[in-house]
Image: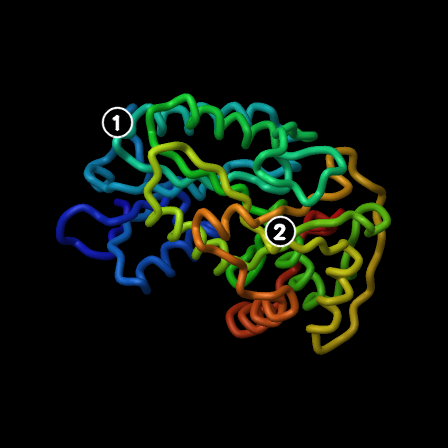
């Protein structure tokens, strides 16, 4: 069954994807704030046979932090994209019209072109299938009667990040380094990205959950600062207590050259700003990894960055 942090009455907040990297942190921060939270996972879904489960009844705000696909999966497995769309559509259709939804989308892939920093007013025109899939889910919500806040999140990192395919370059690089493997970069390393610490994302989600609005809203959630992949590797090197080798692999066809976000709208509309800088965030992520996990053997090159 879905796990609920308190048993009396409906929860204050539901998190779909509660066992994932970001979802688990949202739940943890919400519970630390004294909220009653119900979490849903693939093993314990929020919707069965087209109807919401009992634990979701009466919950005023639902956070969708789940994802079945990564950019690489979206390119290679179109059937996985369709499965995620259909599952999400069933979820949206089953919710009562009064349920407020906070949806985590992809700030790194729904925009395109050379317009960084991207703002919410810029056209969403994804350059890869992953971004197109996320934008389709945004539009499904927009067409529904549900009051919705979309958070277009930049590249998340921090404690709890897995070293699995598509789960984030920082977590993969750290585990690769511990295993004595090189840090792998697709292309020449000049691509710019926006890295945002997981606790900052969780704070943005809770602020969105607490901020009612009569209209649907979209906010970028990122650091607001560009970091090249080479710079990220060098800053990680500075955190590690040993040196690592950086290797370059051929560029992939679905990566964008520059993607970082203007986050001023979130500051104005949610009262949110990122608090944890990249160097501090990398240090915390490394300390968590060393304290909680043995050095693993990562999948070769699967978490490389471009």
| Front residue (pair 192, 92) | 192
- Mark 2 vs mark 1, CA separation in Å: 33 Å
Residue 298, x across and y down, in percent: 66, 56
* SS type, badge 2: loop
* Picture layout, residue 9 above or below residue 127: below
The first of marks 2 and 1 along the sequence is 1
Would residue 263 appear left or right of 17 to someone viewing this image? Answer: right
Q: Farthest residue in the bottom direction?
A: 241
| Front residue (pair 18, 26) | 26
Residue 279, x across and y down, in percent: 65, 69
Residue identified by numbered label 1: 51
Would residue 222 appear left or right of 12 to someone viewing this image? Answer: right
Query: Which residue occupies 37% across, 23% down?
Result: 144
On residue 31, the disc is none
Q: Are the two marked residues, 2 and 1, in contact with CB atoms closer than 8 angstroms?
A: no
Q: What quarter of the picture does the N terminus occupy?
A: top left
Residue 138, x across and y down, in percent: 49, 30
Around disc 1, counting alpha carbons within 10 Å, would you say few (fewer than 14), some (14 to 19), or many (20 or more)? few
Query: Which residue occupies 70% across, 50% down?
Result: 193
Would residue 27 appear left or right of 201 to someone viewing this image? Answer: left
* Picture layout, residue 305 above or below residue 96: below
Residue identified by numbered label 2: 168
Residue 292, x across and y down, in percent: 51, 70
Query: Which residue occupies 36% across, 55% down?
Result: 27
Query: Which residue occupies 43% across, 26% down?
Result: 142
């Amino acid at each position: 069954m879905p796990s609920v942090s308190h048993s009396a009455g409906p929860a204050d907040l539901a998190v779909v994807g509660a066992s994932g990297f970001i979802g688990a942190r949202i739940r943890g921060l919400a519970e630390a704030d004294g909220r009653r939270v119900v979490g849903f996972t693939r093993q314990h879904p929020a919707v069965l046979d087209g109807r919401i489960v009992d634990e979701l009844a009466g919950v005023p705000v639902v956070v969708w932090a789940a994802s079945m696909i990564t950019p690489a999966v979206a390119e290679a497995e179109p059937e996985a994209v369709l499965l995620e769309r259909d599952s999400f559509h069933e979820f949206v259709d089953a919710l009562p019209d009064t349920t407020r939804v906070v949806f985590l989308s992809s700030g790194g892939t729904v925009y395109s072109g050379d317009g960084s920093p991207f703002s919410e007013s810029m056209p969403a025109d994804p350059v890869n299938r992953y971004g197109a899939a996320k934008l389709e889910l945004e539009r499904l919500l927009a067409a529904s009667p549900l009051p919705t806040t979309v958070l277009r999140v930049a590249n998340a990192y921090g404690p709890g990040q897995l070293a699995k395919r598509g789960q984030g370059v920082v977590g993969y690089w750290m585990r690769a380094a511990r295993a004595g493997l090189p840090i792998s970069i697709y292309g020449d390393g000049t691509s710019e990205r926006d890295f945002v610490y997981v606790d900052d994302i969780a704070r943005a989600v809770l602020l969105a959950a607490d901020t009612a609005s009569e209209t649907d809203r979209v906010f970028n959630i990122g650091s607001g600062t560009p970091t090249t992949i080479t710079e990220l590797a060098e800053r990680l090197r500075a955190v590690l207590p040993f040196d690592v080798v950086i290797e370059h692999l051929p560029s992939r066809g679905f990566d964008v050259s520059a993607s970082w976000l203007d986050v001023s709208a979130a500051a104005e509309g949610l009262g949110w700003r990122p608090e944890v800088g990249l160097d501090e965030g990398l240090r915390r992520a490394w300390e968590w990894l060393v304290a909680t996990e043995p050095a693993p053997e990562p999948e070769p090159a699967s978490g490389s960055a471009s």
